């Protein structure tokens, strides 16, 4: 091994065992802890994967585990550029040379960040899992390996934990909102403040760094930079995409239209009329690449027929509502669709299956969510139901959908509380979006 590489490993290990863990917003994700399996922490770039690794270490420190048994090691270091897979063992040997009392006697937690930089790392991790008393967290993303592939490369020896941009609850923690308030009935002043925070959440979004930029110009630049990184490094580089004008135009089209039915055929026709040369098959491939990179996700039509799910358009949602604002003129944003996108992101964190519903008469219900116990809920999102006509339309859609899914609870999520004169039919609960988002994962699918 190169002396410079060995020196860098020793220095980084020394720092890793002494540095205090950074202050962070407590994330709600929790990895499944299974002995003999690594924990793959995945998600979109800049969503907070590295800080989640620190959180996992800090949680163990709070439980009384010795600081020396908690190791964070980042391989994204130019001094380690010559590191080969056969050299990875040196990292562990150096650790146990300094702390021999721990080897094979107690469990040591390792967080290996950007591990994919070292070709063949999978074999090393599998061997260490079998030969040492260790708990291993993995994370990483690059043009050569999307973060999701950190898990798949382990061939069944890793469990996934997906880190998304902040939920609304996490966003409030970042703003030092008292944890006790959502657990009790807030006062009128607190309700007003929560609604103001919700307005900010729709604009600022949940990327951890975005909240530090009070300037809209700077924040938009930051978010556009995130998207460019995904576009060029996770898509163009990795998949050898040469038609960059079509890819950029396709991404802009998606990010400007959250919570809409996605028709690749229509986008293809639009591009053809504008002189953007690209095939429909290539656009479908672009969509798959962007979903793999966690930039967008799509939901199918709810149906027992797989063919019907395949031939009907999917609904498009963005990883975070702020991305729509970063790529659309502010006056053109549909607030109702932003709120629906937020609800979709929250449901995706807590649901085993998520789809949208189209009733026999053609009415649409935004979500049919199924939790991990098999309980289902029909959820309709409406920004404003002050109009009796709007209220009746949304309720009628839920009522019709309930005939097809009679076991599902029904919920109407609105931007604000409905007027006092509005009364929902029996079995349909009406709740403001900000309040529903504060109820917590355990309550998301509660009837």
Image (cartoon, rainbow, N blue to C red):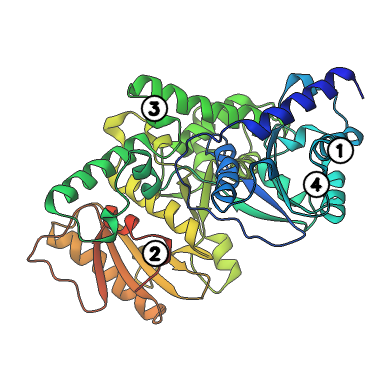
Q: How many marks?
A: 4
Q: Is residue 296 above or below residue 411?
A: above
Marks 4 and 3 sit apart, C-alpha to C-alpha, by 43 Å
Q: Quadrant of the N terminus?
A: top right
Q: CA distance from mark 4 to mark 1?
A: 13 Å
N-terminal of the two: label 3 or label 2?
3
> Quadrant of the rendered structure where residue 329 is?
top left
Among numbered discs 4 and 2, the one appearing first in the sequence: 4
Q: How far apart are the two marked residues, 1 and 3, measured between alpha carbons?
A: 40 Å
Q: In the rendering, at what x and y percent does residue 193 appear?
A: 20, 44
Disc sitting over residue 212 in the figure: 3
| Dot 4 and dot 1 residues touching (CB under 8 Å) | no
Residue 101 numbered tag? 4
In percent of width and height, residue 34 lies at 70, 62
Q: Give coordinates of residue 246: x percent, y percent.
A: 58, 29
Task: Write the residue at 58% across / 40% down.
Answer: 54
Q: Nearer the viewer, mark 4 or mark 2?
A: 4
Quarter placement of the C terminus: bottom left
Q: Is residue 235 visible?
A: no
* Left or right for 24, reference 153: left
Mark 3–mark 2 Cα distance, whole angstroms, equals 29 Å
- Dot 1 corresponds to which residue? 93
Dot 3 surroundings within 10 Å: few (below 14), some, or many (20 or more)?
few
Instruction: Quadrant for residue 256, please give it.
Output: top left
Distance of label 4 from label 2 (alpha carbons): 46 Å
Contact (Cβ within 8 Å) of mark 1 with mark 3: no
Residue matched to label 2 = 444
- Image position of 28 (left or right of 240): left
Which residue does the image show at 44% across and 44% down from the upper left?
Answer: 166
Label 4: which secondary element: helix
Query: Residue drawn at (65%, 39%), measured in percent from left and top?
Result: 282
């Amino acid at each position: 091994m190169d002396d410079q590489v060995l020196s860098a490993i020793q220095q980084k290990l020394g720092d890793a065992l002494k540095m205090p863990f950074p202050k962070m917003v407590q994330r709600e994700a929790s990895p499944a802890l299974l002995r003999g399996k690594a924990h793959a922490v995945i998600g979109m770039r800049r969503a907070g994967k590295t800080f989640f690794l620190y959180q996992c270490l800090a949680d163990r420190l709070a439980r009384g585990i010795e600081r020396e048994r908690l190791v964070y090691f980042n391989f994204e270091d130019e001094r380690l550029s010559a590191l080969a897979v056969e050299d990875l063992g040196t990292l562990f040997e150096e650790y146990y040379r300094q702390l021999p009392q721990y080897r094979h006697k107690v469990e040591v937690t390792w967080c290996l960040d950007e591990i994919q930089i070292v070709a063949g790392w999978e074999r090393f991790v599998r061997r260490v899992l079998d030969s040492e008393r260790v708990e291993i967290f993995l994370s990483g993303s690059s043009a050569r390996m999307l973060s999701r592939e950190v898990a798949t490369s382990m061939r069944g020896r890793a469990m996934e934990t997906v880190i998304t941009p902040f939920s609304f609850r996490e966003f409030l923690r970042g703003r030092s909102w008292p944890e006790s308030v959502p657990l009790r009935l807030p006062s009128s002043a607190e309700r007003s403040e929560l609604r103001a925070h919700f307005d900010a959440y729709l604009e600022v979004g949940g990327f951890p760094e975005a909240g530090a930029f009070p300037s809209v110009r700077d924040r938009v630049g930051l978010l556009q930079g995130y998207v460019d990184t995904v576009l060029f490094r996770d898509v163009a580089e990795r998949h050898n995409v040469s038609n960059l004008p079509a890819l950029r135009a396709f991404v802009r089209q998606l990010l400007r239209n959250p919570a809409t039915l996605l028709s690749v055929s229509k986008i293809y026709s639009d591009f053809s009329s504008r002189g953007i040369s690209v095939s429909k098959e290539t656009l479908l491939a672009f969509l798959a690449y962007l979903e793999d990179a966690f930039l967008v996700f799509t939901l199918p039509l709810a149906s027992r027929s797989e063919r019907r799910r395949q031939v009907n358009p999917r609904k498009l949602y963005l990883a975070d509502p702020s991305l729509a604002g970063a790529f659309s003129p502010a006056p053109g944003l549909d607030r109702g669709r932003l709120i629906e996108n937020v609800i979709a992101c929250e449901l995706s964190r807590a649901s085993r299956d998520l789809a949208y519903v189209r009733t026999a008469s053609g009415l649409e219900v935004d979500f049919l969510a199924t939790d991990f116990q098999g309980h289902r809920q029909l959820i309709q999102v409406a920004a404003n139901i002050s109009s009796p006509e709007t209220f009746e339309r949304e309720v009628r859609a839920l009522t019709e959908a309930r005939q097809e899914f009679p076991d599902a609870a029904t919920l109407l999520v609105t931007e604000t509380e409905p007027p006092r004169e509005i009364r929902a039919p029996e079995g349909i609960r009406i709740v403001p979006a900000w309040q529903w988002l504060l109820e917590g994962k355990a309550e998301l699918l509660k009837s």
